Image (cartoon, rainbow, N blue to C red):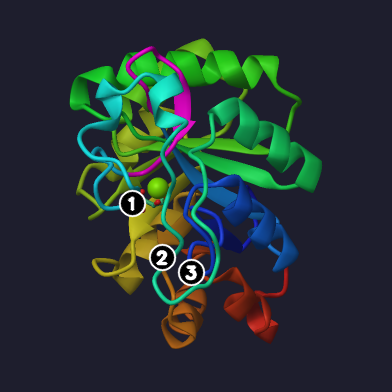
């Protein structure tokens, strides 16, 4: 399999500030073997691990992340999840994240998440530059911005790729073959059983986001999905059907 069957979504984000070094460490402590993280660029072109275009909801800052230089971002903190007594955490650079994941022995599904639609090339290229300078680790690149995946095929064909869709389009297979991806990553809410069967029968793997219900996970597993992205890896890893890595 390309990745493990339980992937810690943005780290163990139900217990720690998402997409931070702390969330990665906690995911490893919970027994996860892979994490999914989002990467975008600061105003001065540094790839950082963060999900939202705007800082307002996740941090004590405000406005667009892309308008901040890294030095300014460093002063901000990502909130711990509501109800957790964990501390707010700094936004890590991609370089720091790769170093931590390597030390923890985790694999990474890096989602290329350009903070604006036009920044896909810069985000991919800056991320690849950091990846090439970092200690190697199991890695899969994915994106909703398929141009970034096409560029990854040209620039770093050796890194496995996956396509992200919220809803599977009719011509999915054509795109998957053209971009030579190994897996399709799909939203849980729109997924149908026949789609999983069709993708698997075509030789691709299927990973589903974001699955936090054990019951729903069980159903998806019975449909043949290879893995799930979950905010609470410990809950899934305590179930017999998810202990295989
Ligand atoms: O990569 C899977 C998942 O993270 C995609 O959605 O919005 O959580 O980045 P989002
Ligand atoms: Mg993501």
Residue that lies at the very extreme toward the front in this rendered image: 75
Residue that label 2 marks: 197
In reply to whether residue 3 is colored magenta, the answer given is no
What residue do we see at 79% from left, 41% from top? Answer: 103
What residue do we see at 66% from left, 75% from top? Answer: 237
> Of the numbered discs in the image, which one, if any, rests on residue 128?
none
> Taking 137 as reference, is 189 left or right?
left
Image location of residue 203, percent across then percent down: 51, 49
What is the C-alpha distance between the residues marked 2 and 1?
A: 37 Å
What is the C-alpha distance between the residues marked 2 and 3?
A: 30 Å
In-front residue for pair 242/76: 76
Residue that label 1 marks: 58
| First in sequence: mark 3 vs mark 1 | 3
Please rate how many residues cluster around mark 2, counting C-alpha atoms within 10 Å: few if below 14, some from 14 to 19, many from 20. some
Up-down: is 152 above or below 86?
above
In-front residue for pair 34/13: 13
In-front residue for pair 56/163: 56
In magenta, the rendered stretch is: 40-51
Residue that label 3 marks: 14
Image location of residue 105, percent across then percent down: 78, 46
Frontmost of labels 2 and 1 is: 1
| First in sequence: mark 2 vs mark 1 | 1
Q: Can residue 128 be seen in this view?
A: yes
Frontmost of labels 2 and 3 is: 3
Image location of residue 25, percent across then percent down: 68, 54
């Amino acid at each position: 399999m390309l990745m493990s069957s339980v992937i810690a979504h943005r780290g163990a984000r139900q217990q720690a500030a998402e997409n931070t070094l702390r969330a990665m460490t906690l995911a490893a402590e919970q027994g996860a073997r892979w994490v999914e993280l989002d990467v975008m660029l600061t105003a001065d072109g540094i790839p950082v691990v963060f999900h939202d275009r705007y800082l307002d909801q996740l941090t004590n800052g405000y406005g667009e992340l892309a308008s901040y230089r890294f030095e300014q971002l460093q002063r901000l903190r990502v909130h711990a999840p509501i109800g957790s007594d964990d501390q707010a955490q700094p936004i890590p650079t991609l370089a720091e994240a790769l170093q931590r994941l390597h030390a923890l022995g985790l694999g990474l599904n890096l989602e290329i998440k350009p903070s604006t639609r036009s920044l896909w090339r810069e985000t991919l290229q800056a991320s690849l530059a950091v990846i090439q300078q970092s200690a190697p680790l199991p890695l899969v690149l994915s994106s909703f911005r398929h141009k970034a995946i096409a560029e990854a095929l040209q620039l770093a064909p050796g890194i496995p790729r996956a396509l992200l869709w919220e809803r599977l389009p009719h011509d999915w297979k054509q795109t998957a073959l053209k971009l030579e991806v190994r897996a399709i990553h799909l939203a849980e809410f729109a997924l149908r059983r026949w789609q999983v069967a069709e993708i698997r029968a075509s030789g691709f793997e299927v990973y589903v986001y974001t699955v936090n219900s054990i019951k729903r996970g069980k159903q998806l597993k019975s449909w043949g999905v290879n893995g799930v992205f979950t905010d609470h890896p410990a809950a899934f890893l305590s179930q017999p059907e998810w202990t295989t890595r």
